Image: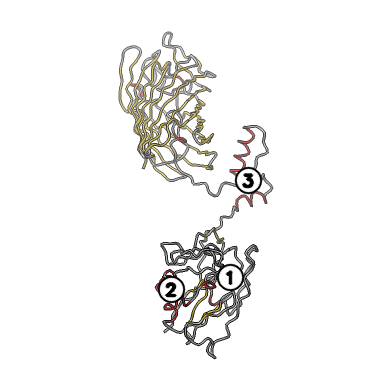
Amino acid sequence: MKTFVFVAAGIYPAFSMGENPAFESAISSSSTTVKSLPAPPESNFTPLVPHGLAPTPATAPIISDLPLSDLSRAANRLKQVDYTQAADPQHESKPIEGVVHWQPQPTFAVAESPPATSLTTSSGPTHSAGMSSQPPATAPPLPRPEAPAEATSAPTSAPAPTSTESQHLPSINVPANAVPTETPHLVSQNSALLPIPAYEAEQSNTSCQACGNSGCLACGRSTAETQFGRFIEGVYAGVCCPDPCYQPRWTMLANASLFTDPVRPQSRQQFRWSYYDDFRHPDRSEYLWARSGVRGPAPEASVDYHELSMYIETGSEKFSFFVNTPYRSLYLDSGGHYAGFADLTTGTKTLLFDTALTQVALQFATHIPSANPRKGLGNAHVSLEPSLLFGVQLSSISYLQLQFSEWIPIAGDRDYSGAMLQYSTSYNRTLLGSVNGTSLTGTLEYTGTFFQDGAYTDSTSGHAISASNQHAAQLGGGLRLNICNKLNIGFGSLFDISGQSWPGSSVRTEIQFRH
């Protein structure tokens, strides 16, 4: 039966067999011959030996088809030895509790089981354990190691193994592009196992290599002297050599606005309540309702209305489909009141460009005339509304959202319906960082509407007045509380700053559930 014994080549010069009965007993249980093998390919290991012991030439750890139980028993035998014999008599002998601490370049030998055992140290003398000092005829002669290098000199690199020796080297399954990492001590005080060096996959920045080969700017390097120039370079780098480590994900900071649609598609359900005060000329360009006195209610100077809507969006990381169903309650300036479901809105959202710095999406909404226009609940025609949505990360705690939309009426009144350019922007900033999954984000928001065509009815004279080139703008802000990225609650308001009062002010509260 074979017996496997590990002998640390950096330790055995200090052994005295007569003074270490535990070690004698460990190796005398069967006849063994120590076989010294050269090291595997060059490594950066450096042996660390206990106090008072001289290092030997580096030989590599040999692990050849040893079961875990044999490894453990062999290491336990070494742990039972009391290393108290010092090679240098000037130093006091200090027991180290039978544990050998190693850093890179450990030296090991594999003991096999021929009949006799001989132990040759780096310093020359041979100790025998009461057995024949000569190896059997069938075993090759044991080469004598070279004398150890001076303590002040650095260890030399071990020779590469030959083809016959490589079969005894450990078989380690590592990736083809793996590189060795820093290795901790191979033997700890609480472990009898001898782990091999750790490996990790090398990450090659192929995108930046491709970027350089294509003639564009080197990734991560900026030559611009202004903030706008650095922003343009960042967008350029995002197109030509995107960050391979970027992980697209939804964040509250990037989607906190209450009056600008979020750029990233997501699966969510939203309930929103909005109140619009002093909404003047409600039939202007047939946006809120149809032409007064024709397909819409009688002319009104202004209206106030509440709107409760349920918004459902479902999709993937790049595409989503949404439906918005509003319920409207109007209070006319003349004292009348109407209530009911308003026009239904459906649409899609497609993420076109997605980097850590910038996101761009195309949203296309279709407004379906499903409400009663006589009560001011709809405008009696189909309207299309394509939008470009942008998200720009300004810093780790601030974000910018933008939206540009074109309102396009179809089959509306020939004189009153007209196109409009709508735009909005929101500056989002984290006010309270994540505390147990909860965060608070503040927004500063601006919206504007530019009337490109259409008309409205003067409530006093009843005449049609052109709405072309008129402009309405509102400014305000809001707060949004995010809970575990699953539930968020928002509140915000806008106030007219253009004098058009379209509307005079608006208040919005919404709650979202993300799926």
Front residue (pair 231, 452): 231
Q: Residues within 10 Å of mark 3 (few under 14, many from 20)?
A: many
Front residue (pair 205, 25): 25
Give the foreground label among 1 and 2: 1
- Say the numbered circle drawn on residue 74: 2
Tell me which numbered mark, 3 or 1, is placed earlier along the sequence: 1
Disc 3 element: loop
Give how far apart the Cα atoms at labels 3 and 2 are: 53 Å
- Say the numbered circle drawn on residue 219: 3
Q: Amino acid at mark 3?
A: Cys
Tell me which numbered mark, 1 or 2, is placed earlier along the sequence: 1
Give the foreground label among 3 and 2: 2
Identify the residue position indicated by label 1 in the image. Answer: 56
Does residue 312 appear left or right of residue 47 in this picture?
left
What sort of colour scheme is used for the picture? Answer: secondary structure
Q: Residues within 10 Å of mark 2 (few under 14, many from 20)?
A: some
Give how far apart the Cα atoms at labels 3 and 1 are: 48 Å
Q: Amino acid at mark 1?
A: Thr
Give how far apart the Cα atoms at labels 1 and 2 are: 21 Å
Task: Determine the image quadrant of residue 233.
Answer: top right
Front residue (pair 321, 455): 321
Give the foreground label among 3 and 1: 1
Query: Looking at the image, which residue is at 34% across and 15% down?
Result: 332
Tell me which numbered mark, 3 or 2, is placed earlier along the sequence: 2
Q: Amino acid at mark 2?
A: Ala
Q: Are marks 1 and 2 in contact (CB under 8 Å)?
A: no
